[in-house]
Amino acid sequence: MHLCYAEYGFQNIDAMEETVVRTARAIALVVFTALGLAAADAPAQAWPERPIRMIYPYTAGGAGDALARLFADRLGPELGTQMIVDNRPGAGGNTGAVAAAAATPDGHTLFSVSPAFAINASLYANPGYDPVRDFIPVAPLSVVPNVLVVSASFPPRSVQELVAYARANPGKVNFGSSGIGTSIHLAGEMLKREAKIDIVHVPYRGSAQAGTDLLGGQLQMMFDSAPTALSNVRTGRAFAIAIASKVRLPELPDVPTMAEAGFPTIESEAWTGIVAPLRTPPAVIAKVSEAAAKALKDPQLLERLKQIGGRPFTGTAEEFGAFIRNEVTRFAVIVKEADIKPE
């Protein structure tokens, strides 16, 4: 049996064959494209295939590590797997950041970030990573404000009195920190710049020893994280005079914010969040972001944050990315103006 090409509107057999070939090619292209898209989406649909590793760039046991583990324990079940905190300390947080940036971007490696993630971009000549270029923002998690505290043996009991004292005694007031380039250090530098006072930075390897010297009177003042500050204030050997945040601390309702004390540009908070290596699938980013949003509505988690003077840090992945970019810019100005060099 033979087809008559004229019955189908073709002038000759060659025209009919050419049309059939073009149609077959178009169908094949559609099929292969669909298969390709399905294959590309398959890893995201199957994710997670194993436990998720969340790199934390400092040693275990500190307040930041405790927060990372708190969120890992809550996010793992929400994502249907175990989330393991992988401590990678070194180089002020750069070691962990470099490891995270180099990880396979399949969604099984995430990175727990804090202010140092943004600060180190300008503090170090070559930190080994770019916080904006090498990572994808995933989700903000928490905010714990820093508190300006003074020794009980130091006369000022307000920011205004502190500024007046420092102006009358240039170079004689020491402020401690948990290390060069930390958010606690930069908060002191911000006060020094904004109040136009001459105060001397004394760096420590961690805030514990700095707090001990503050209680002993060797230091006159320091910005410290809310949990440590609250503990020291309760001993009666330190006084909180301002909160470096937009809002007051419920645990210290009578202590004003830095804005209320006359310095609205001085904000210093230990924020935390999650980023992922560049090229991590968008579907994975969306799932982790959604899980984080759910976690921040968990009453038990919120109560735990409240106990340490913290609060939830909510927002989309895009909003978190904008926040990180702003922090990189803000800290770069402070580091440059204060001529801060890493240890």
Image: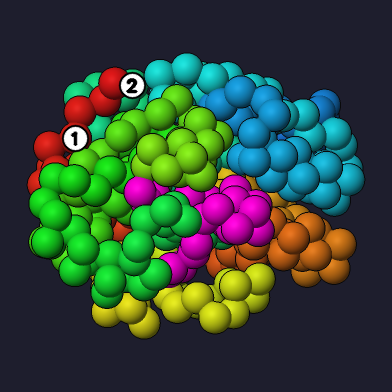
Relative to 128, 92 lies left or right: right
- Above or below — where is 8 with respect to 254? above
Q: Nearer the viewer, mark 2 or mark 1?
A: 1
Q: Nearer the viewer, residue 259 or 242?
A: 242
Which one is nearer the viewer's eye here, 47 or 172? Answer: 172
Q: Position of residue 283 (x, y in %)?
A: 65, 49
Q: Which residue corresponds to the image point at 71% horizontal and 39% vertical from the top-left?
A: 66
Give how far across and how far down residue 34 sits, in percent: 66, 44
SS assignment at label 2: loop
Magenta stretch holds residue 241: yes
Instruction: Check disc 1 and report the residue beneath it.
Output: 340
> SS of the residue at dot 1?
loop
Say which residue appears at 40% left-offset and 29% top-offset: 204
Q: Vertical placement of 267 versus 330: above or below?
A: below
Q: Is residue 229 visible?
A: no
Q: Position of residue 7 (x, y in %)?
A: 64, 61
Is any atom of residue 93 visible in this view? yes
Residue identified by numbered label 2:
128
**Does residue 159 show up magenta in the picture?**
no
Vertically, is 195 above or below 260?
above
